[in-house]
Each structure stands twice: as structure tokens, then as C-alpha cells.
Amino acid sequence: MEKQKTDICNGHHHHEHVGKDEIPADEVLYRMAALFKTFGDPTRIRILSALNHHELCVCDIAECLGMTQSAISHQLRVLKQMELVKFRKEGKTVFYSLSDDHVYTILNQGLDHVNE
């Protein structure tokens, strides 16, 4: 019976090298990690998912998710800081929506990925 050979890196084969210019700068990587960390919270994902369909005020988001307005406001602050949501005021009411198509794409691609 013949033994199977295992490839061992011994300098006898070609290595693919990645140039440093092919990897984003550290500052960009840290910002990207912070972005994904923001997406790492289920409550924030729920808020973004609600906003994926409609522009909503805090009280509508709170009712939809079964949470307090205070808890929603706290999470919206984080989402605003990360530029994932934007807002507009109409009188005393503040309406929130996804900040741009990138957020929509990230949400939908993430959903597609986990549902495969």
C-alpha cells in the first residue's frame, strides 16, 4: 500500500506573496473592525433591519422591537456615530433611516450569507 504524500513548505514550491500595498492601511482596518463590531450586536441588527424597510421614529422602532425608547435611543446613538443611520426632524419628531445603499447592501448580503 502506497503512503499519501503531504505537502510541506520546504522551499520547493512557489509561494504566492501578498504585497503590503494590497492590504489596507492599519487605520482603515481599525475602522472596518469597528464597523463590523457595530454589526455584532443583535439589537442593532434588529434596528437596522426595521429601518431597511421604512423610515421610522424612535417610538415606532421601540414598539416594533418590544423595547423601551431609551434603549432604542442608546443604540441609535451608536449607529449614528458609525454613520449607519441618518435622521431628519419633522417638528419635534425625529425620523431615522439607513444612511446609504452600502448599509442596505451589507445587511442584505449578510442575510443571504447566513441563509445559504
Image (cartoon, helix red, strand yellow):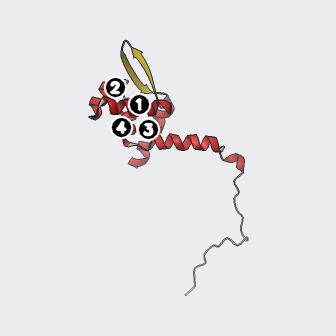
Q: Residue at x 68, y 47 (%)?
A: 22
Q: Nearer the viewer, mark 4 or mark 1?
A: 1
Q: Are marks 2 and 3 in contact (CB under 8 Å)?
A: no
Q: Are marks 1 and 2 in contact (CB under 8 Å)?
A: yes
Mark identifier at residue 5: none
Nearer to us in this view, 104 or 44: 44
Judge the density around disc 4: few (<14), some (14-19), many (≥20) Cα neighbours within 10 Å.
some
Mark identifier at residue 46: 4
In x, y percent, where is residue 110?
44, 43
Q: Residue at x 72, y 64 (%)?
A: 14
Label 2 SS:
helix
Amino acid type for the residue under numbered disc 3? Leu
Residue 38 in sight: yes
Residue 52 in sight: no
C-alpha span from label 1 to label 2: 9 Å
Instruction: Name the N-terminal-most of marks 2 and 3.
Output: 2
Amino acid type for the residue under numbered disc 4? Arg
Q: Quadrant of the N terminus?
A: bottom right
Q: Which residue is mark 2?
A: 58
C-alpha span from label 2 to label 4: 13 Å
Instruction: Name the N-terminal-most of marks 4 and 3.
Output: 4
Against 19, is 97 above or below? above
Against 22, is 73 above or below? above
Q: Which residue is mark 3?
A: 107
Against 6, is 103 above or below? above
Nearer to us in this view, 77 or 100: 77
Label 1 SS:
helix
